[in-house]
Amino acid sequence: MKLSKQIFGWMMYDFANSAFTTIIVTVVYSVYFINSVVSGEAGYGEMLWGRAIGISMTMVALTAPIMGAIADYSRSKKKFLFINCYLTVIFTGLLYFVGPGQIGKGMAFFIIANFGFNSANVFYDAFLPELTTPENIGKVSGYGWALGYVGGLLSLVLSLFLINYDVRWVFPMISLHFFIFSLFTFVWLKEVRRPSKRTNYLKTAYGRVYTSLKNIRKYPQLLKFIASYFVYNDGITTVIAFASIYGITRYGMDTKAMLIYFILAQFTSILGSALFGSLTDKRGVKLSLTISLLIWVSVVFWAFFCGSATEYYFVGLLAGLAIGSSQSNSRTMLSMLTPTDREAEFFGFYTLTGRLSSIIGPILYGWIAHRTGDIRYSILILIIFFSTGLIVLQFVDPQKGLQEARPSTLSIQEEP
């Protein structure tokens, strides 16, 4: 596979945007929000943070089909990627001006930034089929994912330096990181020029969702997998949103300790992606994904019974093994079970499912923390998400799914 400037430009967006997830959603701003902006009674900050995540993801779920239809029919994916990217850049930088007690401003700026971030990914992902062939799409996607880990690692190291001065300087730094490295994307990534079409975008958008719901019933194995993904992805999203908050609230760790924690976890995430990628090739994606979810269940149990900050570091290392592998294997399973002539349709539906499944977990987690006053009980909800997703996954038959998705190809292969 030749790594063209066009493909490299696409992958650099992963390098740019990973800083937002790593620092703003997971490690630094989430903790700053509950400890400095909100403070107050136990669990209140966690509840508001969960609502901020839930509100922003609801906004994305409602608007993504419409924006996707506009981008497709007006041939303006790059324009919408640009708008949403820099919406995130601007409001991430504005987080610097959120001070203690400014809860409304702190939630509003984050909600807009997170909305822009997740909306931009809809258009970013939509470029992939145009850039490469079906044979290389997994490799290109994987390389982008790996480059994203490097970008996240760089942002963690820079944040570790800046918090010695003022934690709020981290937010404009992440904004600048996102801005600078996304320039590679907007300079080198070119959109395929096709004639625009006039259409009723609202009707087209939700017509697509209806069509996907109707068509997906023809592929039972794909439907079962998406049901499994809907549940366990809620658990993954909640872990990303609350991992630092859990460590700081329960063990008294500070932001510097959590940055080191996630720097170490980045390395096990890379290791996990490599190990489970090899396992997928040798023994199949279902076994690999099953083991990843079993690790997630173990991580949650261990975090519940974990007795010290030192021990929590080891929990994080184990979680690192699971997070990269579970996300990359999910994309691999979807690629296997999706008919080649419906890839765009079902990948769009998969993206919508991922956004919808990111709403329930963070809101529920925050609500339990507030009601009980003990964040330890919130983590138990994750066992339900991962266990249910794991159980549903066992009903997926990848071989049958392949036959449903590509019957003509399989019938040719089976001929003597």
Image: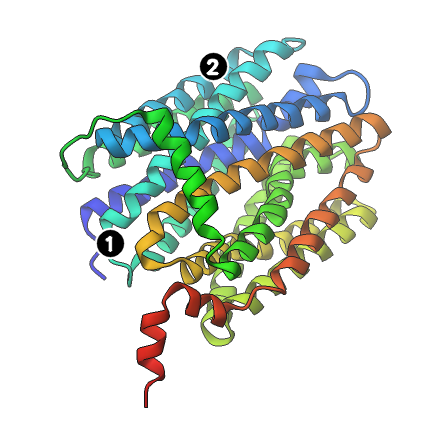
Amino acid type of the residue that numbered disc 2 sits on in the rendered structure: Leu
128 horizontally vs 279: left or right: left
The quarter of the picture where the C terminus appears is bottom left
Write down the quadrant of residue 137 in the picture: bottom left
Amino acid type of the residue that numbered disc 1 sits on in the rendered structure: Thr
* Residue labelled with disc 2: 94
Q: CA distance from mark 2 to mark 1?
A: 37 Å
* Name of the residue lying farthest toward the bottom: 416
* Residue labelled with disc 1: 132
Write down the quadrant of residue 376 in the picture: top right
Height in image: 87 above or below 365? above
- Dot 1 alpha-carbon crowd within 10 angstroms: few under 14, some 14 to 19, many 20 or more: some
Residue in the foreground of this view, choosing between 337 and 268: 337
The percent coordinates of residue 387 (x first, y second) are: 71, 55
The quarter of the picture where the N terminus appears is bottom left
Residue 37 visible in the picture: yes
The percent coordinates of residue 393 (x first, y second) are: 61, 60
- Say what secondary structure mark 1 lies in: loop
Numbered label tally? 2
The percent coordinates of residue 364 (x first, y second) are: 72, 33
In the image, what residue occupies the spot 57% across and 10% down?
105
Height in image: 355 above or below 317? above
- Say what secondary structure mark 2 lies in: helix
In the image, what residue occupies the spot 47% across and 76% down?
282
Please identify, in this view, whether the residue under mark 2 or under mark 1 is nearer the observer: 1
Height in image: 196 above or below 35? below
In the image, what residue occupies the spot 40% across and 18% down?
90
148 horizontally vs 111: left or right: left
Disc 2 or 1, which lies upstream in sequence? 2
- Dot 2 alpha-carbon crowd within 10 angstroms: few under 14, some 14 to 19, many 20 or more: some
Query: Which label number is shown at residue 32?
Result: none
